[in-house]
Amino acid sequence: MPNLPLHIYLAEQAAEILDWGHVFDHIGSYYLGSTAPDIRAMTRWPRERTHFAPLSVEEVGTGARTMLQRYPELADHPDMSPATRAFVLGYISHLIADEVWITTMFRPHFDNHNMIT
């Protein structure tokens, strides 16, 4: 999966391309969200707990969909602060980036247990 600096870069690019100008008012929250799923490296939590999808994920968007189904208030709660909204968008950018990497890079090129014999 992308490393943390790349997650921050990809999140920033997504915000610019998608014209999410409001996240730049809360850039710290947005960047924190874009790296937060990898807290599992320190906590040893299962991947599904922080990424909402297994490494065997087939479809990009699965983790974000699962997260929003499990926690629908994250979709657009009327009382959500702009900083929290920025964090959630950053978090989703991380989930999407990982799933793109898994489905286009990891699985086709590295998920072959017989690569080195």
Image: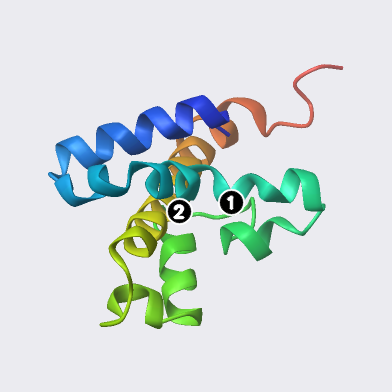
The residue tagged with tag 1: helix, strand or loop?
helix
- Name the quadrant containing residue 42: top right
Query: Mark 1 and mark 2 in contact (Cβ < 8 Å)?
Result: yes
Q: Is residue 113 above or below residue 68?
A: above
User: 44 above or below 102?
Assistant: below
Which quadrant of the figure has residue 38?
top right
Q: Which residue is mark 1?
A: 37
Residue nearest the viewer, comparing 12 with 106: 12
Q: Amino acid at mark 2?
A: Tyr
Residue 96 versus residue 8: which sits nearer the camera? 8
> Who's the residue at 40% across and 82% down the image?
72
- Percent from the top left, x then y, of residue 63? 49, 61
In the image, residue 56 lies at what x, y percent? 62, 53
Classify the position of the C terminus by image quarter. Answer: top right
Secondary structure at badge 2 equals helix
Residue 10 position within the rendered picture, expressed as x and y whole percent measured from the top left: 36, 32
Task: Tell whether 51 sits left or right of 33.
Answer: right
Q: Residue furthest right?
A: 117
Q: Nearer the viewer, residue 52 or 56?
A: 52
Q: Quadrant of residue 17?
A: top left
Q: How many marks?
A: 2
Q: Quadrant of the N terminus?
A: top right
Q: Residues within 10 Å of mark 1 (few under 14, many from 20)?
A: many
> Which residue is tagged 2?
91
Sooner in the amino-acid sequence: mark 2 or mark 1: 1
Q: Residue at x 33, y 55 (%)?
A: 86
Q: Is residue 117 visible?
A: yes
In this view of the protein, can residue 99 be seen by the observer? no
